[in-house]
Amino acid sequence: MGSYIQEKIHKFEQFVDGHLKPQLVRVIAERDKVFEQQKIFSDLRMNIENLEKNSVTNLRTMVNLGSEVYMQADVPDTQRIFVDVGLGFHVEFTWTEALSFIALREEKIAGQIEEYTRLISSIKARIKLVCEGIRELLQLPAEKSLPQRVF
């Protein structure tokens, strides 16, 4: 095999290992953060729905003061809640307003997850394409696909 081909293969491998794989890892991590946001809003929605369903007007709970230090708190009126809307801002909402806000955020988050998933698929396709190019340069036989079962 010529040094030209070896050099091309090395460049392709560097591109995959130095660019595409780190990009894939970064995008997957970003999508995971969005999944965490989705879970937070889903939990909040379920908690509000439970408060409504059970007609809870006051409650006793544990509040995280930071660094996993908790304190018992009494909530005399649960009809209004504060929701983190981003950038460190919290807005006071009624249950209905909070549920409307959560629905909008969940819709936006679902779109973000879909976009990240498309980007992940695109990066994986590019990796596969480059690996196929390396395979052709090495003149290896194509990977066999799994046989299709006929019923």
Image: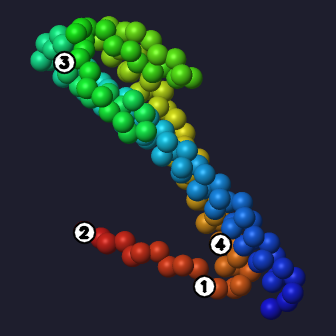
Q: Residue type at mark 2?
A: Phe
Give the residue pinned by disc 1. Answer: 141
Q: Earlier in the sequence, mark 1 or mark 3?
A: 3
Q: Earlier in the sequence, mark 4 or mark 3?
A: 3
CA–CA distance in space, label 4 to label 3: 61 Å
Disc 3 versus disc 2: nearer the observer: 3
Residue 87: percent from the left, percent from the top? 57, 23
Render colour scheme = rainbow
Mark 2 Cα shell of 10 Å, populated few (<14), some (14-19), many (≥20): few
**Cβ atoms at labels 3 and 2 below 8 Å apart:** no
Q: Residues within 10 Å of mark 4 (few under 14, many from 20)?
A: some
Q: Nearer the viewer, mark 1 or mark 3?
A: 3
The tag earlier along the polypeptide, 2 or 4, is 4
Q: Position of residue 5 (x, y in %)?
A: 82, 82
- Furthest toward the right, the residue is 4
* Mark nearer the viewer, 4 or 1: 4
* Three-letter code, disc 3: Leu
The mark lying in front, picked from 2 and 1, is: 1
Q: Earlier in the sequence, mark 4 or mark 1?
A: 4
Distance between the alpha carbons at the discs numbered 4 and 1: 10 Å
3D distance between C-alphas at marks 2 and 1? 29 Å
At 67% from the left edge and 79% from the top edge, which residue is drawn?
135
Q: Which mark is residue 59?
A: 3
- Density class for disc 3 (Cα within 10 Å; few <14, some 14-19, many ≥20) is few
Report the quarter where the N terminus lies.
bottom right
The amino acid beneath tag 1 is: Pro
Q: From the image, tell me which residue sits under label 2.
A: 151
Camera sees residue 50: yes
Horizontal side, residue 147 vs residue 127: left or right:
left
Choose the circle earlier in sequence order: 3 or 2.
Answer: 3
- Identify the residue shown where x is 75% and y is 70%: 14
Mark 4: amino acid: Glu
